Amino acid sequence: MKKLFLVANWKSHKRVEEAQAFLKTFLEEEIDLNETDKHIILCPSLLSLPVLTHDLQSLTPSFEISFGAQNISPFSEGAYTGEEAASQVAEFAKYVIIGHSERRKEFNETDEILERKVSLAKQYNLEPIYCIQGKEIAIPEGVNIVAYEPLDAIGTGQPATPENAEDVAAYLKENKNIPYVLYGGSVTAQNVHSYTTEEHINGVLVGTDSLNPNSFLEIIKNA
Ligand code: PGA
């Protein structure tokens, strides 16, 4: 059975209380994922992460979820004001998104910085979800999960075609030995199936439509 990662990237959305309300509603739903290989990953703000981890202990969901962070520092613990090191993030998260186009563009993250982040993440057993915007983008050593997110598909309602996403996924698996390739960019409950049924695609990275518990639940069910 094909492994599918269904990843919610909340970006700078939701205050702590809103994140808690999402989790409660989301986990009230009965979904049977036993016969599937679906892995659900929520990536909230770092401020909500410890609170949600704590809340999860007192909830009894019908399905399993994991948490991811949206960023880590390119440095180890030390005198780096305002940064969270991989070792600190790893206390609460299993995954970390690295290389998102918003971080490359708005925070000037270069391939060299991203490579350092991947290496630190791996050192502390945080699994990177490494975003690339096209086939030509460098992928650091040790990355197991890549998310293909073409720039003009992010937040636009204009997703890439499943054929284009499949073409990139097949290329990355065959030429770069990437075990898992996800697609991201304007994924909805209506279009998710067209990606996840492609042979080489192992899931989706969802921004906008992951913010509402019901729409993200629909995405999970339809995947
Ligand atoms: P979107 O964002 O689903 O809102 O297009 C995807 C992403 O940026 O990961």
Image (cartoon, rainbow, N blue to C red):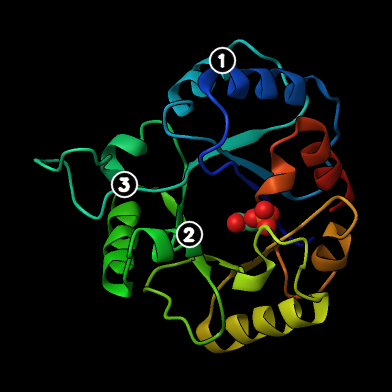
Q: CA distance from mark 2 to mark 3?
A: 24 Å
Q: Which residue is mark 3?
A: 124
Q: Amino acid at mark 1?
A: Asp
The image quadrant where one finds the N terminus is bottom right
Q: Position of residue 169 (x, y in %)?
A: 66, 78
Q: In terms of depth relative to the viewer, which is nearer, 41 or 136?
A: 136
Q: Quadrant of residue 65?
A: top right
Ligand 1 sits in quadrant: bottom right
Residue at position x 23%, y 38% in the image: 82
Q: Marks 1 and 3: which is nearer the front?
A: 1
> Is the shortest distance between ligand 1 and the CB of mark 2 under 8 Å?
yes
Q: Amino acid at mark 2?
A: Glu
Q: Amino acid at mark 3?
A: Tyr
Q: Which residue is mark 2?
A: 102
**Left or right: 84 in relation to 11:** left
Q: Badge 3: how crowded within 10 Å, few (<14), some, or many (20+)? A: some
Q: Position of residue 111 (x, y in %)?
A: 33, 73
Q: Secondary structure at mark 3?
A: loop
**Left or right: 82 in relation to 176:** left
The vertical placement of 91 against 96, above or below, is above
Q: Badge 2: how crowded within 10 Å, few (<14), some, or many (20+)? A: few
**Left or right: 166 in relation to 11:** right
Q: Which mark is residue 90?
A: none
Please report whichever mark, 2 or 3, sits nearer to the chain's N-terminal start. Answer: 2
> Is the shortest distance between ligand 1 and the CB of mark 1 under 8 Å?
no
